[in-house]
Image: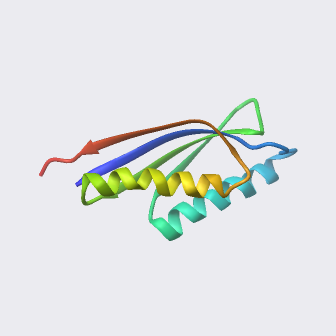
């Protein structure tokens, strides 16, 4: 079993208030959680409304599935009104 962990920094252009930021972030989180069964944690930037960090985890049965999860996350982000500042993935193997 493998865990695919993502650390992603996002810029949300045009955000004027907290409500607008939450709408964008919740949309991304819902797509990742409901359709693809990812676990998502939002870490808001303390000084900027237009910046957010996401921590995402995915458990996969195979290493290949863990690798493919990167493409799924990228596709969802590409379809959202955000700019990806940094995108890091780490894959961990769980021993039995």
Q: Residue at x 66, y 58 (%)?
A: 79
Quarter of the image for residue 9 reads top right
Residue 37, position in %: x, y? 44, 65
Q: Residue at x 74, y 52 (%)?
A: 81
Q: Residue at x 32, y 43 (%)?
A: 91
Left or right of residue 89, residue 91 in this image: left
Left or right of residue 10, residue 12 in this image: right
Q: Residue at x 75, y 43 (%)?
A: 12
Q: Is residue 52 above or below residue 32?
A: above
**Residue reaching furthest top?**
47
Task: Identify the image's colour scheme: rainbow, by chain, secondary structure or one colour.
Answer: rainbow
**Residue reaching furthest bottom?**
35
Residue 52, position in %: x, y? 66, 40
Left or right of residue 96, residue 89 in this image: right
Residue 56, position in %: x, y? 48, 49
Q: Is residue 64 above or below residue 90?
A: below
Quarter of the image for residue 16 reads top right
Residue 78, position in %: x, y? 63, 53
Q: Which image quarter holds the N terminus?
A: bottom left
């Amino acid at each position: 079993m493998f865990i695919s962990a993502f650390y992603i920094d996002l810029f949300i252009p045009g955000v004027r208030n907290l409500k607008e930021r939450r709408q964008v972030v919740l949309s991304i989180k819902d797509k990742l959680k409901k359709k693809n069964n990812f676990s998502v944690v939002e870490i808001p930037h303390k000084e900027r409304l237009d910046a957010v960090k996401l921590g995402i985890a995915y458990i996969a049965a195979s290493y290949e599935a863990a690798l493919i999860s990167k493409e799924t996350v990228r596709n969802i982000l590409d379809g959202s009104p955000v700019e990806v500042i940094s995108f890091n993935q780490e894959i961990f193997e769980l021993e039995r």
